Amino acid sequence: MEIEQIEILEFLKRYSPFQELPEPQLLQLAQSIDVGYFQAGSEILRFNEPLQALHLIRSGAVETFRRNGDLYNRLSEGGIFGEQGLLRGGKVRFPATALEDTLIYFIPDKVFQQLFDSNEFFADYVEVGDTERRQSSKAARQAKADLLSVKISTLLQREPVCLGSSASVWQAAKTMTEHSVSSLLILHENTLDTPGAAQAGTLAGIITDRDIRSRLVAPGLKSEIGVSQIMSTKLVTVEHQQYVFEAMMLMLRHNLHHLPVLKQAKPVGVLALSDIIRYESQNSLFVVSSIFRQQSVEELSALGKDVKACFVRMVNEDANSQMIGSAMAAIGRSFKQRLLELAEQQLGPPPVPYCFLALGSMARDEQLIVTDQDNALILDNSFIAEQHDAYFQQLATFVCDGLAACGYSYCSGNIMATNPQWRQPLNVWQQYFTDWIEQPSAERLLHSNIFFDLDAVWGQTQWADQLNQLILAKAAARPHFLACMVRNALQRTPPLGFFKDFVMENDGRQNNSLNIKRRGTAPMVDLIRVHALAVGCGATNSFERLRDIIATNVLPKGRGEDLRDAYEVIAMARIRQQALALQADETPDNNVMPERLSEFERKHLKEAFSVLSNAQKFLKFHFKA
C-alpha cells in the first residue's frame, strides 16, 4: 500500500462503523477512497443532485440541512453524511456545507453498497445510527439557540494582540508567532501633530495569516514593507456587549473568520470563528460524544479541560444545580462506560455477566467538578472467585485507574470495585442490604449510607433495579433501621452558631473557611434520603425525592418547599466557588470563604443553613432518634 492509503487505513480504524470491519474489507475500502477539500462556507452537497459517494470527514466541520434550510446535523472529524441519499435512490436528501476548511474522504457508492449488503453491523449503523445523529443535531440546535443570549465578551479568552501602524510585516509575523495568534490588530499611533487624524490607540486595520500568504508571500513582496500596505482597512467590528449570534451573522454575511471587538472605540479582543465552535463544543452533550470517540485512557484524560470548561459555561449561563449536577453525572457515567468498553477490548469478554454500579452523587445526578469515585460490581450468581475473580479484579483496576487519570480521584474510604468486598455476586449484595436493614446499627450504617444511592452504569442493569426494589420493600417497615440512619444524618450539622454567625473550619490550608459539602450539601442529602426511605420513594435524585416527600404531607406545610430552596442555595454556593476557582486557574475544592461572598449571598446562605438546622430538629423529633 502507498503511504497515503496507510494513513487512510489508520484513520478508518479509529471510527465506527469502519473500525468494526474485517481487515480484508478495511484494506479494500482504504484503497478505494478519494479525497476532496472544501473551503469554509463552500457547498458540498446540493439537494436532489446525484450522489455518488459516502462522505467521511477527515478534518474540519460540516453542517447538513433539511430541504427548508433548517439545520439537520453538525458533524466533525469521523462523522459521515450522505448515507440516507445512497440508501434512497442515490439523490442528496440533506444538503451539506463546510463550516470550516474541511477534508473529505469519498467512499464510492459501489463500495458502500457492497459493505451494506455484506456486513450486518455496517448496515445497522448507517440505517439505525441516523436517529442518534439526529439527536446530536438537536443538541447542536440548542447550542446555537444559546448563542442568542450569550454576550460576545463571554467568549473573549485574552487581551487583543496589537501593533502600531508604522510596524513592518516582518514585525507583525514575528509578533503573531510569539503570541500564537492567527490575527493581529493594527492601531493608529500618536497623531497629535496631524489635524483631523484618527485618535491614537484606535483601530486602523487587521492582518491575518491569510493576508500574509495572499498579499505578501504570493506576490513576492519583501517582509520589510509596512503593515499598512497589506492590512485590511474596511473593517467589520462588533461591540463587546453585542450577542454572539449577531457576530455569527456578520461573519456569514461578510465571509469573515475574525471580528475585532470594541469597547468605547478601543479594541478589547478578537472573536474568531474557532472561538464560537469551541464554545459550542463545551456543551455537555458534545463532551459526552467526544468521550466515546477516544481510543485510550490517555486520550480520555486529555478531555479534562473540556469537562471543566463545560462546568464553568453552565455556571456562567445561570444553570441551576439540577442541570449542572445532571450534566456532570452524565459525563462521569460516559467516562465509566467508555473505560469499560476499553477494558473489555483489552481483557476479552467477561467470564460471567456483570453490572457496574455508580454510587453517591453520580447515582443521584448531583455530581460536580470536585468529586471522587464511588463504584462497585455486581457479578452473576454463577461467579466462582477462584475461576473468575482475576478477570474482574483487572477490569476494576483498569476502570478505577482510568477514572483517576480523568480527574475522578480514588475514594478515600475504598468504596470502589477494586475492593473485593464491593465486587460480589448478586445474592451476596442482596444479603448485604438485608443485613443493613434488618440488623442495623448506627456504626454499621455509617459507611454504607452511600450504597442507598445506587444506579447501574453498564451491563446487567436490571440487577441494580432489583436491589433498589429490595430496599423499597424492606426499609420503610423497619423503624430501627430508620432511626439508625437518622442518628448518622444528624452527625453533621450546618455551620451556624447560637447567634446565627458562621462557624468556621480550622483545617490548616483552609483556615477560616466553610466546608460547604461536609456542613451543607452532605447533611441535606442524608436528611432527604431518610425521609425518602421512610415514605417508600423510589427516586434517587434529592430534588425528585423531595417532590415525593412533599406529596405525602409527612413534613409540616411549606417545609418541603423550604428544604428544596435551601438545598439549591447551598448547592449553588458550592458550585459558584468551584467555577470561580477554575476561572482563576486555581484548584477547586469544597471550601467557601465567607468574606468573599456578597452580603446578599451571606444572608441567603445563613437562611438556608437555618432551614437545614430546623429540618434536622424535626427529623430527630419525627423518628424519635
Image (spheres, rainbow, N blue to C red):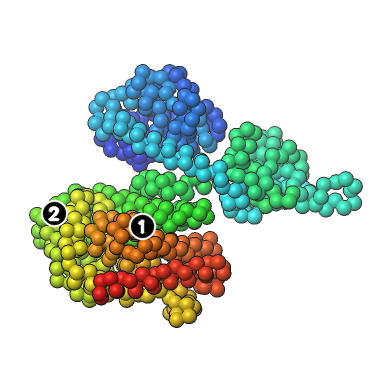
Check residue 543 in the rendering and tell me which mark sits there, or answer none: 1
The amino acid marked with disc number 2 is Asp
Q: Position of residue 260 (x, y in %)?
A: 67, 45
Q: Residues within 10 Å of mark 1 (few under 14, many from 20)?
A: many
Q: Secondary structure at mark 1?
A: helix
Residues 516 and 1: in front is: 516
The amino acid marked with disc number 1 is Phe
Is 291 above or below relative to 567?
A: above
Front disc: 2 or 1: 1
Tell me how far mark 2 sits from mark 1, CA to CA: 33 Å
Q: Position of residue 138 (x, y in %)?
A: 43, 38
**Farthest front residue in view:** 557
Q: Position of residue 62 (x, y in %)?
A: 48, 34
Horizontal side of 400 relative to 386 (left or right) equals right
Check residue 430 in the rendering and tell me which mark sits there, or answer none: none
Please report whichever mark, 2 or 1, sits nearer to the chain's N-terminal start.
Answer: 2
Horizontal side of 284 relative to 360 (left or right) equals right
